[in-house]
Image: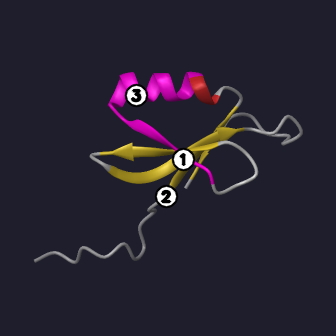
């Protein structure tokens, strides 16, 4: 049986974007992901879900970030 551990693999992906609602709508339609609100932080954050499992999140890119919208692994 193959080793199913997560060691050495990216296991969480965050999208920092200027329009989280539009990103959620796009990825829901394009790849079938859903989102679930997470209430544990100071800023709104939604977790990406695929096949019922969380695998990342999406949040507002701060205006002073000095970076364009991007994915973080």
Residue segment shown in magenta: 22-39
The residue sitting at 16% across, 75% down in the picture is 2
| SS of the residue under disc 1 | strand
Which of the labelled discs sits on residue 57, or is there none? 1
Would residue 23 be counted in the magenta stretch? yes
Front: mark 3 or 2: 3
Cα–Cα gap, marks 2 and 1: 8 Å
Q: Where is residue 46 shown, x and y percent of the image? A: 55, 43
Q: Where is residue 55 shown, x and y percent of the image? A: 43, 53
Q: Is 66 on the left or on the right of 18, as rendered?
A: right
Residue on which the image places disc 3 = 28
The residue sitting at 68% across, 42% down in the picture is 44
Cα–Cα gap, marks 3 and 1: 13 Å
Which of the labelled discs sits on residue 21, or is there none? none
| SS of the residue under disc 2 | loop
Whichever of labels 2 and 1 marks the residue nearer the N terminus, that label is: 2
Q: Are marks 3 and 1 in contact (CB under 8 Å)?
A: no
Label 2 environment density (alpha carbons within 10 Å; few <14, some 14–19, many ≥20): few
Q: Is 8 on the left or on the right of 16, as rendered?
A: left
Which of the labelled discs sits on residue 12, or is there none? 2
**Tag count in the figure?**
3
Whichever of labels 3 and 1 marks the residue nearer the N terminus, that label is: 3
The residue sitting at 64% across, 57% down in the picture is 40
């Amino acid at each position: 049986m193959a080793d199913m551990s997560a060691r050495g693999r990216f296991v969480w992906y965050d999208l920092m974007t200027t329009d989280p609602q539009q990103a959620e709508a796009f990825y829901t339609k394009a790849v079938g992901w859903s989102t679930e609100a997470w209430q544990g932080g100071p800023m709104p954050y939604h977790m990406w879900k695929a096949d019922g499992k969380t695998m990342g999140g999406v949040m507002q890119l701060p205006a002073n970030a000095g970076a364009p919208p991007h994915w973080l692994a």
